[in-house]
Image (cartoon, rainbow, N blue to C red):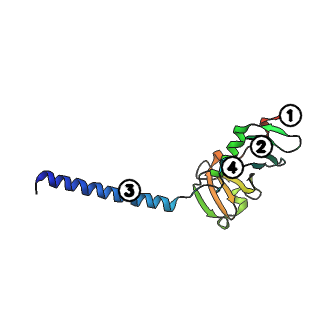
Amino acid sequence: MKRTTRQRLWLLLAVFALLLLAGWQWQRDARTATGNLTALDPTLITHIAVTLPGAPAEHYEKRSGHWWRVDGAPARAVDARLNDLADTAAAPVLRWRPASDFEPAKIGLAPPRAVLQLDGQMLEFGEVSVTGPQHYVRVGQRVALVSSRYVPRSPATATTELH
């Protein structure tokens, strides 16, 4: 066998080995993926309710592509702020654990620090995790760790009354 043929054969074997290794890594990553906070599509959400400690729940509804506060007199809300809240539905989860693994009071879920309802799906936000800028979020019978960027704040400060 010629030297160039032998070199090409080794090169092909190396490429094949790298492809096998990449395929194995891709499958491993797919098996361990944690997914999103909910299965909801943020662009399709039409009802949002936000409850923060010491304040009544604020309810919003999407009408003709714009967000409106529906508590009391209708008021137009800042679309970007409410869209940010809707985006919480697709927040990437860093880790899931069963709710039974925690004492709710120790992670700020008894009572929750904030409650966000997206089309009826309740998300209860707790304390900051000791592992970084992440918050505990109870979704049904599971608790997720998500980036602190998704913790709800009151969008009510950005509404305007209709006359």
First of labels 4, 3 by sequence position: 3
**Residue 99 figure quarter:** bottom right
At label 2, the amino acid type is Arg
The CA distance from mark 4 to mark 2 is: 12 Å
First of labels 2, 3 by sequence position: 3
Q: Position of residue 30 (x, y in %)?
A: 49, 59
Seen from this angle, which residue lies furthest front?
Answer: 64
Give above or below for 157 relative to 127.
Answer: above
Classify mark 1: residues with Cα within 10 Å, few (<14), some (14-19) or many (20+).
few
Do the CB atoms of the residues marked 2 and 1 lie less than 8 Å apart? no
Q: Which label number is shown at residue 63?
A: 2
User: SS of the residue at dot 2?
Assistant: strand
Give above or below for 64 relative to 34.
Answer: above
Residue occupying the point 49% across, 62% down: 31
Residue hosting label 4: 44
The CA distance from mark 4 to mark 3 is: 35 Å
Q: Which label number is shown at residue 103?
A: none
The CA distance from mark 2 to mark 1 is: 15 Å
User: SS of the residue at dot 4?
Assistant: helix
User: SS of the residue at dot 3?
Assistant: helix
First of labels 1, 4 by sequence position: 4
Residue hosting label 1: 162
Mark 4 or 3: in front is: 4
